[in-house]
Structure formats: structure tokens, C-alpha cells
Image (tube, rainbow, N blue to C red):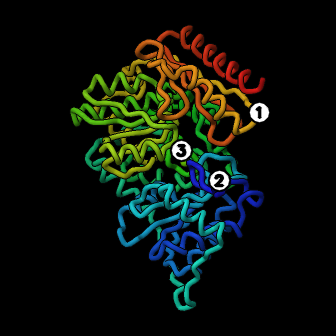
Amino acid sequence: MRQLFGTNGIRGIVNETIDCLFALNIGMAYGSFKKGKIAVGRDSRISGLMLKDSFISGLLSAGCEVIDTDIVPTPAIQYYIKDNPSVKGGGVITASHNPPEYNGIKVIAEDGTEASMDEERKIEEVYFEKKFNKANWRDTGAYSTLNIIDHYVEGVKNVLDLDSIKCKDLKIVLDAANGPGSLSSPIFLKDLGIRYVGINTNIDGTFPGRNPEPTEENLEMMQKFIKNGRFDLGVAHDGDADRSVFFDEKGRFIDGDIILSIVAKYILEERGEGTVVTTVATSSSLKDVVEEYGGRVIETPVGSIYVARTMMETGAIFGGEGNGGLIFAEHQYCRDGLAALGKIIKIMVNENKSLSELVDEIPRYHIFKDKMAVKSIDDRKDIIEMIKKTYSSDERAQTENDGIKIYYGEKDWILIRESGTEPILRIYAEAKNEKRAKDLLDYGKKLIKNGIKNNYV
Ligand code: MG
């Protein structure tokens, strides 16, 4: 059967690969087997209103009771669903960090986590077979709107126990990408009495300020602000505010892997032991820190859903990815950009250290990333399989997670994996020594080239 859902729900270019009719049918398909209360929200994209209303219409036609939260951070609606057992599921119209012409649909399970693959397959089945379950007319009108932002901000403050900490001297630069983080993060900072300067903190779905992907290149404005003023840190969200990236007081962009290490270290110091989950692409610095403080690391394929599910299965205390997606088990099993900001603030205040001091305590590795184009999406798999075969009896190679990760010594490694959406292979190489990391990257590229040769000749 054809698939609609990828690792991040459904994504597409508006009115080309995703339109109102599609959103309506997905709403009808979801409602056909998911009865009861369903919460629906969206990010700030200008196509969000039409797609959300279409999706809601589908749910209403199936007889669901719809709670429309409109523009909210993705983790806010996930928190609302988790916190309200009478709500049986949800949908978010979002394309997260993608450019403004994109949008998407993410389905949320009853416990607030991203819908399981089973549930996604069910939606696809009803959608493709057009087995829609339409309700009696009397049952088609249950609709209400609800503002959940305050509830969410309170929830994050409570779980992190932030009311008691003295953070009033902090000065922060906040860049909310003109997305839904513009609604929650300013309230959060004001509540804590923290002074901040906001960049891109008005809702605007054309993203006039910057690309919604919070990479260092897209955050020049933030860097300038910090370098020209006196701030303790800078924080930037992605387009749906489930991620946060940070700058220290010197204006340095902090690698997401280092943020994971800082948070993991703090949590383990508090608890003494525990499991931390991350993906195969994360720096060994996390492993160094976690093991030093009495914990263990479990690696998953790349993708926050794998991290979240593995955390639930193993009872892990913390997890995340190097792209700024942090998951706190005591809060909820999904990425949460506001909780990430709150945790960093709490660590700085409780440890009485600047962010740069916290960063400089973490062991550093050199990591290089590159990508190589292949002829087609199918070729990606064939080439990876070829490399896996070469290493099948080599115990340095790990192949159970995502692509192939080969260790050279205890901490140096190469990872080769498929891109989720494009005909390219991604390659990562990490080592303590910079030259060795570069050499490993070149060696990984050679492995791919040999794979391509064998594949095409
Ligand atoms: Mg996101």
C-alpha cells in the first residue's frame, strides 16, 4: 500500500502535494475510527488556516468532537492532550522547520506522543480505500475553541520547579521564528521576571525574519544582538517551537550535542543514575559525560519519534537529538522547546555558571558531516546494503539502528545513512583529533564511492 506518513507525519508543498481536499480526507479518515474528543492546532503558516479548517471539517463529518486550539507550539497541544484524558487524540497542521511554502499534518496519540505507525497505517487504509465513516447529521456539530497557551506555560514551569529559582538578573535574546513560540516563550520569560529582547516574536506565516530552521547561518541577527549587547544567552526556536538552540553570552552558537551533554550531566548529578537516549548521529561527548556521571546511553535511528519511543520502553530519564530537540521524561515524551529553555535557565542559575562555562566543561570531539548524491532513492538502500555486506563479519560495525556506524577505536567513528526524503547518503565522521576526523570522513566517502561503483557497473 502507498504511504502518506513519513517520520515527521505528512509533509508537502501547499496546493501542489498537500491541499484542502487532502486535509479534509485525512480528517475524515482519522475520524472514521477515532471517535470522541480530538484537539486540533497549527503553526503560524499562512496556509495553516485553510488546512486546519479542512481537517476539522473531516473530523466533524465523522462525528468527532473538535477542540480547536488554533496557533500553538506542537508540544503545547501534545501537553494538553496528555493532561486531559477525555481527549482521545489530536492533529497539528505544521511543517516544523521547512520553508513557508510547505505544510503538513502530524497526528497525536491519546497519551500526547506522536501517533504510532499502526495508527498512521489505519488512516492510510481508510484514506486510500475511501472507507469513510460518516456520522448522523445530529452528531456533526460538536466544535469549540480553546486557548491552551497559559496551561502549557504553567505546566512547563511546574514540572521544572522554576518558580523558586532566582533568575531575575538574566538577560536573554529570544528569536521565535515568527512561529507559535512567539505566543508562549514571552509569557514564560515575563512570568519568571526575566528581561528579554524579542526578535521575530510576532506571528507571521511568511517567515519574513528568517528561515524557520534554527541553524547558525539562519541566526545572524541573534549573534549580532548578543555581540553588541550584554546578554546571558540567546535562544531560538524552530517553526513549531518543539526545538531550541542556544548562543552563549559571548555570542557563540552552541552545538546541539553539547547542550544534550550539559543537560544530561545536570540530570544525572541530581539522580545518580539513569538512561539517556539519543541517536547514532550524536557526538561521543554525550557518552563520555553520561558514563562519568553513572548513567548509560542508548542509541536509536535518527528521528525524535525513535528517541521518544525508546525512552518510554526503557524508562529513560532524558533524551534528545543534536538539532535542539530535547525530551524530558518527567514532562512529556516529545520534544519541547520551552522546556529546553527552562532547563538551561535552571542549570545556569542553580550551578551559578555562565552558559560558556557550562559549555567549556564538556569534552569536545571534532565532527564532520557531508553528503553524496546517488542516482535514485532506491539506490540509497542498495549502496548501504553493499557497505554492510563488506563489514558483515567486522565487529566494529553496528548495523541494527540506522545505516552503518563503524567504530575505529573506542570513540572515533563513521556513520553512513540514508537521507529520509532525498536521493542522497549522509556521512558523519567523529574523532578526538581533527585530522583523524577529516581522514575518517574521506574514508567514508570512499566506501560510498566503491558502493556506487559496484552498484552501477
Ligand atoms: Mg519542529
Q: Residue 421: x, y in percent?
A: 66, 42
Instruction: Check disc 2: other Cα within 10 Å, few if <14, some if 14-19, many if 20+.
Output: many
Q: Which of 342 and 221 is in front in this view?
A: 342
The answer as to whether callout 1 falls within 8 Å of ligand 1 is: no
Tell me how far mark 2 sits from mark 1, CA to CA: 23 Å
In the rendered structure, the answer to whether residue 252 lies left or right of residue 14 reads left
Mark toward the start of the polypeptide (2 vs 3):
2
Tell me how far mark 1 sits from mark 3, CA to CA: 34 Å
Q: Is residue 371 above or below residue 156?
A: above
Q: In this view, does 337 lie above or below 245?
A: below
Going by the numbered disc 3, the residue's amino acid type is His
Tell me how far mark 2 sits from mark 3, CA to CA: 19 Å
Instruction: Check disc 3: other Cα within 10 Å, few if <14, some if 14-19, many if 20+.
Output: many
Q: Residue 435: x, y in percent?
A: 56, 8
Q: Nearer the viewer, residue 42 or 194?
A: 42
Q: Which residue is drawn at 53% across and 20% down?
A: 391
Circle 1 residue: 375
Which labelled disc corresponds to residue 237?
Answer: 3
Q: Nearer the viewer, residue 437 or 208?
A: 437
Q: Which of 161 and 307 is in front in this view?
A: 307
Location of residue 25 by image quarter: bottom right
Q: Do the residues labelled 2 and 1 touch (CB within 8 Å)?
A: no
Q: Secondary structure under badge 2?
A: strand
Q: Secondary structure under badge 3?
A: strand
Q: Is residue 437 visible?
A: yes
